């Protein structure tokens, strides 16, 4: 565990660690911790509503990653010597609610798949923005190990977003554009 600490950490000399930026960092960390935990509960419902095998696979593998991301965040809390705490993220709560509305309103099949992809991509973009900011904060704060943990998650979120774009472009959107709305 010891080698995870930044060399400046804990020697009391680094004033950055009691700065306002550090406070903001911690509060955003609690926010994304809440968001990831909420996603672990929300993604299975999306998997259940998805039809395309490729979409089901993409969501299933991202669910696994999301669980790892939660552990990674817990490690970040540990490294900065704070208790892992979740604070409600209103934005993620809203995005998950919207995903639910889309799934209720869509016809089963390609339309629902296209809707799920659009909802999940909005979620990924929120996560990309958050991890991008957190990673940058960590760099400024001199928290090297934390920075690299957050960069790993950021990479996963970006890859998930790109994978969903590919699944959508390849087949789902095309099929959905050919399906006629039931009169
Ligand atoms: Fe995530
Ligand atoms: Fe938030
Ligand atoms: Fe994600």
Image (tube, grey):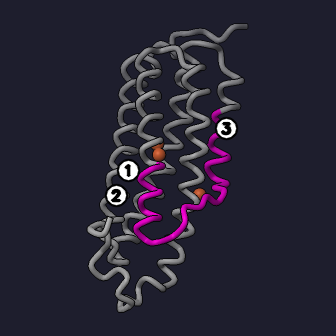
Q: Is residue 82 above or below residue 107?
A: below
The stretch in magenta equals 70-99
Residue at screen point 62% across, 43% down: 95
Q: Is mark 1 within 8 Å of ligand 1?
A: yes
Q: Is mark 2 within 8 Å of ligand 1?
A: no
The C terminus - image quarter: top right
Mark 1 highlights which residue? Answer: 153
- Contact between marks 1 and 3 (CB within 8 A): the answer is no
- Contact between marks 3 and 2 (CB within 8 A): the answer is no
Nearest the viewer among 100 and 143 is 143
Q: Residues within 10 Å of mark 3 (few under 14, many from 20)?
A: some
Mark 3–mark 2 distance (CA, rounded to whole Å): 29 Å
Under tag 3, what secondary structure?
Answer: helix
**What is the count of numbered marks?**
3
Q: In the rendered image, which quarter is residue 65 located in?
A: top left
Q: Is residue 77 above or below residue 124?
A: below
Point out which mark residue 98 bears.
Answer: 3
Nearest the viewer among 136 and 88 is 88
Between disc 3 and disc 2, the foreground one is: 2
Would you say residue 177 sits in the magenta stretch? Answer: no
| Nearest to N terminus: mark 3 or mark 2 | 3
């Amino acid at each position: 565990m010891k080698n995870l600490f930044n060399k400046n950490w804990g020697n009391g000399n680094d004033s950055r660690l009691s700065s306002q930026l550090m406070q903001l960092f911690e509060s955003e960390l609690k926010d994304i911790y809440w968001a990831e935990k909420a996603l672990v509960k929300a993604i299975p419902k999306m998997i259940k509503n998805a039809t395309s095998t490729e979409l089901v696979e993409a969501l299933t593998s991202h669910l696994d990653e999301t669980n790892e991301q939660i552990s990674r965040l817990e490690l970040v809390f540990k490294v900065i010597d704070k208790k892992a705490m979740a604070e409600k993220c209103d934005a993620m709560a809203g995005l998950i609610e919207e995903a639910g509305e889309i799934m209720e309103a869509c016809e089963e099949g390609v339309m629902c798949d296209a809707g799920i992809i659009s909802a999940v991509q909005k979620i990924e973009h929120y996560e990309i923005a958050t991890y991008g900011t957190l990673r940058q904060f960590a760099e400024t704060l001199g928290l090297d190990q934390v920075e690299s943990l957050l960069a790993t998650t950021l990479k996963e979120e970006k890859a998930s977003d790109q994978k969903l774009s590919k699944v959508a472009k390849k087949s789902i959107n095309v099929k959905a554009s050919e399906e006629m709305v039931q009169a």
